[in-house]
Amino acid sequence: MEIKDIIPSKLYHCGTFSLSKIDSEGNPDLQELFLIFQKYATKHAEILSIDKDFYEPENLLYVLLRIKAILLKRMNTTEKYRIVTYALFPQKIQFYREAYIVNEKNEPVCLISSLWVLIDGFKRRLVTTDKLIKRLEPLSSEMKKLDYLFGRELKPLSDEKGEFCFNYQVKEEDIDNNKHMNNTVYFKLIQEAKLSSLISSIEINFEKESFLSDTLKIMKKEEDYGTYYCGINKDDKISFKAYVTYN
């Protein structure tokens, strides 16, 4: 796969970064990596005028439902990386944000696809993307030419609970502006549950929100081609589920 230079445009946002940590298996710190994705996605939302100045007066929240990353090459702490992110034009009740990361040789090292929805901030219920569509209408013809990075939508993962690893209580520093545990913390929990080797892909579905002082039971199930992870909340419901594959 060849990554070409992006012509400056409102459709894309680019930035450079370095990683600060690599685990014992050679994997990047997953929470750090996805905080970087989150940072540049937020900045691009500002450029598109769909940031907090748009959603806060409407009492709307962006909520991440699914995310998948494929790691194509080993990453390190000595190299500078470039991330490019873009949004697809919204569908009726959902929208996608994609990103790819290249190294100093302009070789792709990571591909990311993410599925988002809008919810009512008071009722915590799903709402349509009508207001988002209206705001992005001037860019609709250009945005509709963009495609999924993996060529298709993300599908839901199966429910696989596995064996108990540890309990995790949600801390104050885990809470974000949406008043729930930030999605990047789930990546940390997966890494703390021990990755078996150098990963080739990671996919997470977010099922139930986690709030301050909630306790999650982190579960893990090893299979021939990868590992399932999930978090079980106090109501015995799945909070998140994930699947990791290895090189």
Image (cartoon, rainbow, N blue to C red):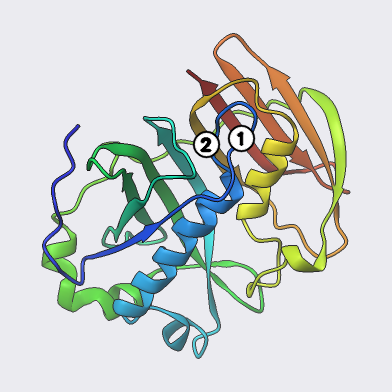
Report whether 173 appears left or right of 84: right
Report whether 206 appears left or right of 213: left
Q: Could you say where residue 213 lies in the image, as x and y percent from the top left?
A: 88, 62
Could you tell me how far apart the alpha carbons at marks 1 and 2 are, in whole angstroms?
Answer: 5 Å
The residue that appears at 54% across and 58% down in the rendered structure is 35
**Frontmost residue, 178 versus 121:** 178
For the residue marked with disc 2, what is the amino acid? Answer: Glu
* 59 vs 187: above or below: below
Report which residue position mark 2 lands on: 203
* 161 vs 62: above or below: above
Report which residue position mark 1 lands on: 242
Residue furthest to the front in view is 78
**Frontmost residue, 20 versus 27:** 20
* 179 vs 235: above or below: below
Which numbered disc covers residue 165?
Answer: none
**Frontmost residue, 124 versus 217:** 217
Residue 172 occupies quadrant = bottom right
The residue that appears at 37% across and 30% down in the rendered structure is 72
Report whether 33 appears left or right of 46: right
Residue 69 occupies quadrant = top left
**Which sits earlier in the primary sequence, circle 1 or circle 2?**
2
Determine contact: label 1, label 2, CB under 8 Å: yes
Taking the image as drawn, is residue 235 in sight?
no
Q: Could you say where residue 219 lies in the image, as x and y percent from the top left?
A: 78, 31
The residue that appears at 45% across and 53% down in the rendered structure is 18
Secondary element under disc 1, as helix, strand or loop, is: strand
Q: Could you say where residue 32 lies in the image, as x and y percent from the top left?
A: 57, 52
Report whether 74 appears left or right of 193: left
Residues packed near mark 2 inside 10 Å, few (<14), some (14 to 19) or many (20 plus) = many
Secondary element under disc 2, as helix, strand or loop, is: strand
Quadrant of image for the N terminus: top left
